[in-house]
């Protein structure tokens, strides 16, 4: 049985889909949901599934607290589902090709510093793009540049707003992220 940890900073709608997907799996279990925000709604969602939670500050993470927790819990895979802090290099190195992130755009477009959450959807709208999508990738030391595992796209029209773009992207994420993780294990 593989042990997965989800790191998330916010609402955790993706985390919820992943927990639901693996709830009765014989292959893997979500052993931990960890967040840098003590008030993040993802922690409520974890409780609903009976998944243990762990919170930490940026300072604690940088001092190695999160890595120690993941190791003491015998975590095999780390899933980033809306995790907004820059991850320390030693933590990334501890999970070579075993750390997965989802990005709400078609990388390499709209990646890099400052490109997260609604900033991405606003940039897509401002550029007048006719499609957007999701990218699921492994994490290496240059965050958004790890090997791309999967992409899916959705068409956009001039009537789309950053909000409707976000809805379309979330729908793609919820549909694909759990099954792509499952396939990687
Ligand atoms: C998702 O759009 C994901 O791509 C991005 O952060 C968002 C998290 O949404 N990295 P949620 O917390 O899973 O609802």
Image (spheres, rainbow, N blue to C red):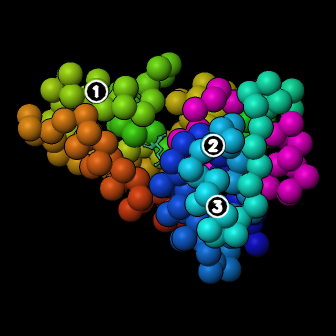
Which is more N-terminal, label 3 or label 1? 3
For the point 60% across and 44% down, which residue is it? 40
For the point 21% across and 28% down, which residue is it? 125
State whether label 3 is within 8 Å of ligand 1: no
Query: Which stretch appears magenta?
Result: 65-90
Residue 77, magenta (yes or no): yes
> In whole angstroms, how far apart are the C-alphas of marks 2 and 1?
26 Å
Residue 185 in view of the camera: no
State whether label 2 is within 8 Å of ligand 1: no
- The location of residue 9, given as percent across then percent down, is 59, 40
- The location of residue 61, given as percent across then percent down, is 79, 31
63 displayed left or right of 184: right
Check disc 2: other Cα within 10 Å, few if <14, some if 14-19, many if 20+.
few
- The location of residue 167, given as percent across then percent down, is 29, 48
Quadrant of the snapshot with the N terminus: bottom right
Q: Secondary structure at mark 3?
A: helix
Circle 3 residue? 46
Relative height, residue 50 to residue 106 (above, below): below
Residue 171 in view of the camera: yes
The residue nearer to you, when weighing 83 against 26, is 83
Check disc 3: other Cα within 10 Å, few if <14, some if 14-19, many if 20+.
many
Circle 1 residue? 122
Residue contact between numbered discs 1 and 3, judged by CB atoms under 8 Å: no
Q: Secondary structure at mark 1?
A: helix
């Amino acid at each position: 049985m593989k042990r997965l940890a989800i790191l998330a900073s916010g609402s955790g709608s993706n985390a919820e889909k992943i927990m639901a997907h693996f709830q009765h799996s014989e292959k893997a279990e979500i052993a931990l949901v960890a967040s840098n925000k003590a008030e993040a709604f993802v922690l409520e969602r974890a409780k609903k599934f009976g998944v243990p939670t762990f919170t930490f500050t940026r300072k604690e993470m940088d001092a190695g607290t999160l890595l120690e927790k993941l190791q003491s819990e015998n975590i095999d895979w780390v899933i980033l589902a809306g995790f907004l802090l820059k991850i320390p290099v030693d933590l990334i190195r501890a999970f070579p090709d075993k750390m997965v992130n989802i990005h709400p755009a078609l990388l390499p477009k709209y990646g890099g510093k400052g490109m997260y959450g609604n900033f991405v959807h606003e940039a897509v709208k401002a550029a007048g793009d006719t499609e957007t999508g999701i990218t699921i990738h492994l994490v290496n030391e240059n965050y958004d540049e790890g090997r791309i595992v999967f992409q899916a796209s959705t068409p956009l029209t001039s009537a789309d707003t950053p909000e409707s773009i976000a809805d379309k992207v979330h729908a793609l994420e919820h549909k694909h992220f759990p099954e792509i993780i499952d396939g990687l294990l």
